[in-house]
Amino acid sequence: MTTDCLFCRIAAGEIPATVVRETDTTLAFRDIGPKAPVHILVIPKAHYADVATLAQDDPGLAGAVLATAAVVAETEGLLVDGFRLIFNTGEYGGQEVFHAHAHVLGGAPLGPMVAG
Ligand code: AMP
Ligand code: ZN
């Protein structure tokens, strides 16, 4: 737990979030500024700054984040039409919150992969 980390505080229940799924090691909640009809964030409860650090230090936990993202995609009804899974990483990746998280986006055509 990093007390000045927003997503650690959400994982600890100190800041409210609309939780859609929780496991022993992961939490999924709705993004506060949705960029698609369905926009959910999936985090490891433990603090890792980004997905690269998470995957290097605890690949099993990285897999758990992916597994939760897949279940969320299924429960949100995204499997038939498809969805996008994004890990913004570092400055060029546009990462704003430095606690590893997957964006699960869907519910409509999402357009090109990156802005042109
Ligand atoms: P990123 O740019 O990949 O670091 O994404 C951070 C995401 O966190 C953005 O899509 C924000 O809308 C979202 N966000 C910021 N604060 C909150 C919050 N309190 N609850 C839910 N989502 C949040
Ligand atoms: Zn954190």
Image (cartoon, helix red, strand yellow):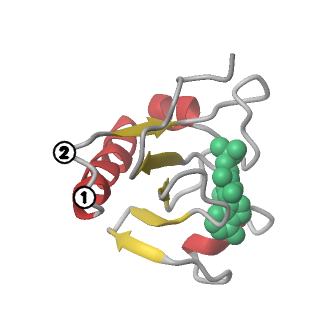
The residue at 34%/51% (across/down) is: 69
**Residue drawn 62% across the image and 34% down it:** 88
Q: Give the structural element (helix, strand or loop) at label 1.
A: loop
Q: Nearer the viewer, residue 32 or 108?
A: 108
Circle 1: is it few (<14), some (14-19), or many (20+) Cα within 10 Å?
some
Q: Which residue occupies the extreme left position in the image? A: 80
Q: Quadrant of residue 34?
A: bottom right
The circle drawn on residue 64 is none
Left or right relative to 97: residue 24? left
Which amino acid type is marked by label 2?
A: Val
> Which is nearer the eye, 89 or 44?
89
Instruction: State yes or no: discs 2 and 1 in contact (Cβ < 8 Å).
Output: yes
Where is ligand 2, by quadrant?
Answer: bottom right
| Disc 1 target residue | 77
Q: Residue at x 53, y 23 (%)?
A: 113
**Residue 56 point in image, percent of width and height:** 48, 28
Q: CA distance from mark 2 to mark 1?
A: 7 Å
- Which x, y percent locates residue 47? 60, 54
Q: Quadrant of the C terminus?
A: top right
Q: Is mark 1 within 8 Å of ligand 1?
A: no
* Residue 74 shows in this picture: yes
In percent of the image, x 19 and y 45: which residue is there? 80
The residue where tag 2 is placed is: 80
Number of numbered tags placed on the structure image: 2
Amino acid marked by disc 1: Gly
Q: In the image, residue 60 lies at what x, y percent?
A: 32, 41
